[in-house]
Image (cartoon, helix red, strand yellow):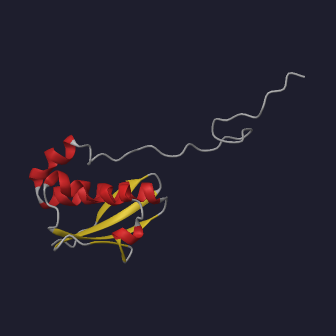
Amino acid sequence: MTDKIYVGRRKTSVARVYLRSGSGKVTINDVDAEKYFSLKDHQENILLPFLVTGTTGKYDVFVTVKGGGLSGQSDAIKLGIARALVDINAEFRNALKSEDLLKRDPRMVERKKYGRPKARKRFQFSKR
């Protein structure tokens, strides 16, 4: 349907999403979504924008995703799909916005500081 690329980001993951009208097939990095995400939670997370808008099974999704882990990647794909659906039909915006599917989650891993073992953890204090 569209040749436009929609980008979704989460943590360090970046997903580029292509949407076409079809039968609801989801392909991630040339692999079927069920094989790419073994956890059911990640699979359902990706399809959440379709459930909210009532367009389940109407669009084929092609995704290339890089970086991060599976949780960040599934959230990045979810945001990309939500943005694509809003571009296809502006009436979906209110439904997706009320479910917070159009928000980019800004939380990132805090960097490690010098003189410490981790970002906030400190070495054991010794009085003597």
37 left or right, relative to 61:
right
Quarter assignment of residue 21: bottom left
Quarter assignment of residue 126: top right
Up/down of 126 relative to 108, above or below: above
The residue sitting at the bottom extreme is: 30
The residue at the point 14 percent across, 53 percent down is 53
Q: Position of residue 11 (x, y in %)?
A: 45, 51
Quarter placement of the N terminus = bottom left
Up/down of 38 relative to 32, above or below: above
Q: Where is residue 101 in the image (x, y as percent from the top left)?
A: 26, 48
111 left or right, relative to 11:
right
67 left or right, relative to 89:
right
Quarter placement of the C terminus = top right
Q: Position of residue 62 (x, y in %)?
A: 29, 72
Quarter assignment of residue 87: bottom left
103 left or right, relative to 11:
left
The residue at the point 64 percent across, 44 percent down is 112
